[in-house]
Image (cartoon, rainbow, N blue to C red):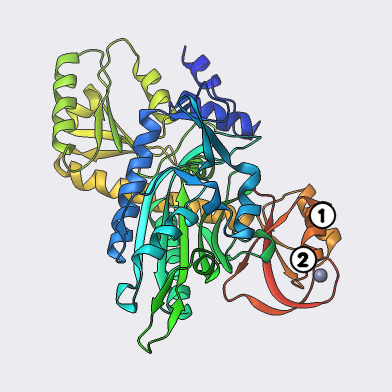
Amino acid sequence: MEKEFVKAITPRSEDFSQWYVDVVLKAELADYAPVKGCIVFRPYGYTIWEYIQAELDRRFKETGHVNAYFPLFVPESFFRREAEHVAGFSPQVAWVTRGGDEDLAERLAVRPTSETVIGVMYAKWIQSYRDLPVLINQWCNVVRWEKATRPFIRTTEFLWQEGHTCHRTAAEAEEEALRMLEVYRSFVEDYLSIPVIPGEKSAGERFAGAERTYTIEGLMGDRRALQCATSHFLGQNFARSFDIKFLDVDGQLKYVWQTSWGISTRIVGALIMVHGDDRGLVLPPTVAPHQVVVVPIVGRDSERVLAASREVTDRLRGRFRVKLDDRPEFSPGWKFNDWEMRGVPLRLEIGPRDLAAEQVTAARRDTGERTALPLSRLEEGVAELLDEVHRGLYRRALEFRQAHTHEAGDLASLRAIMEGPRGFIRAHWCEKPGCEERIKEETGATIRCLPFGEQGEGRCVLCGEPARQVVYLARAY
Ligand SMILES: [Zn+2]
C-alpha cells in the first residue's frame, strides 16, 4: 500500500512535466475543468493563493495603493485605440458577440488586461494635478485564449492583480514602476523563498504598449526560467490614446505618465516547480494551508497517545495553522506519505516512546531531518523549525540557481549549454533585435532580462561585436 502510494507520483528526476501534473492533481491543488484550457482551483490550491493575495494586498496598501474593480468586458472601440496594444493582444482575445437573443452592435472583448477600460475612466476622473497620483489596484480574472496550456503556468482564464497608476511626471512614474518591481522581488524572495533576478526586458519582450518593462525571473527545477511578475513604465502612450490630461501647476494641459504591474496565479506554479521534490510538493510555511500536521503513532496506549496529540494540537492552534490527522483508517506511514506529498512543512509524530520522554518527534519536509522536541518548549521549537524550513528553502533554491548559471562567450558555447546543462546563461548582447531573434532560433533560449547594474566590456554572444550590455538567457515557460 505504502509503496504503491509513493509510486503514484512520477519522480521529478524522471519526467519533470509529468511530475508537475501529478503533483497538481494528487495534492488536490487544481483539476482540469470541463472547458478546454481552464482549471478549477481546488480548496488546497486556492488557499495558497489566498495567502499570497493577503500578503501582497497588505504590501500594496503599505505603499499607498487602494483597490477598485472595473468591468470584465471591454468595448472593441476602446481596445483598438492603442495600436501596439491591440496588435499585441489580438491573437489571444475572446469576444462576446451576442447578449441573450440579440447580436451586439459592438463586440465586447473579455479583458486580457485592463489598461484600456481603466484609461477611459481615468480620462473622466483626472482633471488637475490635484487629482494625482492615482494609485489603484484591481484583483480579478483575465482571459487569454491559449493554444497550449499547463495548470497555473498558462491557462485560458487566470487570476491576478493589476495595478494602474497615473503620475504628474515621468520621473514619478518611473520611480513607481521600480518601486512595485521591488515589492514583487521582496515578496517572491522573502515570502515565497524563490530567488529571482530583477531586470529590464528587451524591446522584443516588452509589454504591448509599454516604454519599459521590468521583470523578476526565477529558475524552475527543470532549469527553465519563469517570469514571476512584471512592472511597466507606460510613458504617455495610453494617456495619448485615451486622452488622460490634467491641468498642471504651471497652467498647462498635459498628459499623465502611467504604470501598470501584475502578478498572477502562475506564481503558484513557480512554488511547485522551485521547491518540489520526488515525493511531491514542498511549501514554504508562509503559504502552506497546514504548517504543521500532528500524527499520533497509535498502537499500545492509543488513548493516551490520542489525548496527548489533541493537547499538542490545541497548544499550537492560534499561533500556527495546525492539523491533527487522527483518521483511524490510515496507518501512520500512509499519513506521512500523504502529508509529504501535500508539502506540509513540519510533521509532529507522537508515540508511546515520545510520551514517556515528554517530547514529540519533529520531521522537516524539506530535508527529512527528524529531531526530538521537548514538550516544555513546544511552541518555540515549532517556530524555530518552521523558520529554518523557510530559510532553508530559499538557500537551496539559490544554490540550485547558482549551480545552473553559466557564462557563454559565443554561439557555440551557448548552444552547448542549451543542449547540455541548460539553466541561466549570462552573456553579452549588442542590443540588436536581429541577434536576439537569431539566438532564439538557433538555441531556443530567449533573453529573460537585462539585469540591473550589470554592464561591462564584452562581445555579443551572437555577432561577436563589442557589447556592454549583460543579459540572462534561458529557455522559458
Ligand atoms: Zn549582436
Residue at the spot x=53%, y=39% of the render?
Answer: 105
Q: Is residue 216 visible?
A: yes
Mark-to-mark CA distance, 1 and 2: 19 Å
Callout 1: helix, strand or loop? helix
Up-down relation of residue 31 to residue 418 (above or below): above
Point 55% across, 68% down: residue: 237
**Is 127 rendered above or below residue 33?**
below
Q: Quadrant of residue 379?
A: top left
> Is 407 or 382 nearer to us in this picture?
407
Q: Quadrant of ligand 1?
A: bottom right
- For residue 222, what is the image quadrant? top right
Estimate the x, y position of residue 104 in percent, counting from the top left. 51, 35
Label 2 CB less than 8 angstroms from ligand 1: no
Residue placed under numbered mark 2 in the picture: 433
Task: State left or right for residue 443 relative to residue 157.
Answer: right
Q: What's under tag 1, amino acid-wise? A: Arg
Q: Nearer the viewer, residue 279 or 241?
A: 241
Q: Of the residues under marks 1 and 2, which one precedes in the sequence?
A: 1
Circle 1 crowding by C-alpha within 10 Å: few under 14, some 14–19, many from 20: some
Q: Secondary structure at mark 2?
A: helix
Who's the residue at 63% across and 33% down the image? 17
Residue 147 x/y as whole percent: 66, 35
Image disc number at residue 164: none
Q: Is residue 213 above or below residue 349?
A: below
Query: How far across and how far down the image is residue 142, in percent?
Result: 48, 42
Q: Residue 114, percent across and down?
A: 47, 52
Residue underneath mark 1: 415
